[in-house]
C-alpha cells in the first residue's frame, strides 16, 4: 500500500484506533491487539489505556501466525469462553454488529459465529468457542481464521454483514471507502 495500513486516517482517528474504539464500546470484553510489522510506530499512535498490546515477532509468517500468537497469549492470561476476532481494515464493522455476534453466541456449544460475506464466503469478525483455541493457537500461515471456520462448518452460525464488509487491500480500495464514508 505504500503506507502503514493500520495508521490510515479514518473518521477522527486512524483505522486501527477506530476498530479498537468500536471494540471498547462492548464493555464486557478485554481487548487484545496483536501487532507485528511497524510495531513501535503503531503502538506509539494508539491512545487507549484499557487494552493489551502484544508483539508477534513472527508476523512475517502471516496472519495465521498473529492469530496463533494472540490466542496463546489469551489462553495464558485469561479464562474466557470465546474469542472475538476483528481486523483493522474493516472500519465499517460497528459495535451493534459485534454485539449481535456476541448475543448469538452460545457458551460451551462448540460454536463459531462467523460473518457471511458476498458469495457466501465466511470470515471475521468471528467469535470462536474455547473448543477451537488449540486449533487456532497452532496456525502458522497466511490463511487467517477462515480455515478453522471451513473445517467446522456444521458448527458455524453465519451472520450476514454485506453492507459492513470492505476489503482494504490497495490504495484505491482505501480511497474509495474513505470517500464513501467521509
Image (spheres, grey):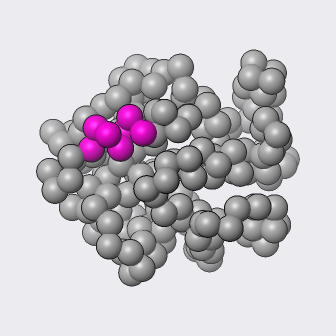
Indicate left or right for 149 with 177 as reference.
left
Q: In this view, does 162 lie above or below 91?
A: above
Between 118 and 71, the one nearer to me in the picture: 71
Which secondary structure class fits the magenta region best?
A: helix
Between 69 and 83, the one nearer to me in the picture: 83
Q: Is residue 160 above or below residue 139?
A: above
Q: Which residue is drawn at 46% across and 33% down?
A: 97
Indicate left or right for 40 with 134 as reference.
right
Residue reaching furthest to the bottom? 76
Image mark count: 0
Indicate left or right for 76 with 89 as reference.
left
Q: Is residue 68 above or below residue 76?
A: above
Q: Which residue is drawn at 27% across and 44% down?
A: 105
Q: Residue at x 35, y 48 (%)?
A: 127
Indicate left or right for 109 with 113 as reference.
left
Is residue 100 on the magenta stretch? yes
Res. 97 visible in picture: yes
Residue reaching furthest to the front? 27
User: For residue 99, what is the image quadrant?
Assistant: top left
- Indicate the position of residue 88 as horizontal and vertical percent values: 63, 47
Q: Name the quadrant of the C terminus.
A: top right
- Indicate the position of residue 135 as horizontal and vertical percent values: 29, 64
- Indicate the position of residue 125 as horizontal and vertical percent values: 45, 42
Q: Read off the magenta span.
A: 99-105
Res. 123 visible in picture: no
Q: Name the quadrant of the N terminus.
A: top right
Q: Residue at x 76, y 61 (%)?
A: 47
- Indicate the position of residue 148 as horizontal and vertical percent values: 31, 51
Between 110 and 68, the one nearer to me in the picture: 110
Amino acid at each position: 500500500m505504500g503506507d502503514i495500513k493500520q495508521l490510515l486516517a479514518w473518521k477522527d482517528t486512524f483505522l486501527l484506533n477506530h476498530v479498537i474504539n468500536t471494540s471498547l464500546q462492548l464493555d464486557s470484553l478485554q481487548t487484545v491487539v496483536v501487532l507485528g510489522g511497524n510495531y513501535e510506530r503503531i503502538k506509539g499512535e494508539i491512545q487507549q489505556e484499557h487494552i493489551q498490546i502484544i508483539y508477534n515477532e513472527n508476523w512475517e509468517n502471516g496472519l495465521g501466525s498473529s492469530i496463533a500468537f494472540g490466542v496463546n497469549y489469551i489462553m495464558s492470561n485469561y479464562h474466557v469462553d470465546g474469542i472475538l476476532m476483528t481486523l483493522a481494515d474493516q472500519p465499517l464493522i460497528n459495535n451493534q454488529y459485534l454485539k449481535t455476534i456476541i448475543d448469538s453466541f452460545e457458551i460451551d456449544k462448540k460454536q463459531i459465529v462467523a460473518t457471511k460475506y458476498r458469495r457466501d464466503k465466511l470470515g471475521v469478525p468471528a467469535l470462536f468457542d474455547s473448543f477451537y483455541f488449540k486449533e487456532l493457537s497452532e496456525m502458522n500461515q497466511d490463511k487467517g481464521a477462515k480455515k478453522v471456520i471451513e473445517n467446522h462448518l456444521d458448527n458455524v452460525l453465519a451472520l450476514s454483514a454485506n453492507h459492513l464488509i470492505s476489503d482494504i487491500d490497495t490504495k484505491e480500495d482505501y480511497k474509495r471507502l474513505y470517500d464513501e464514508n467521509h
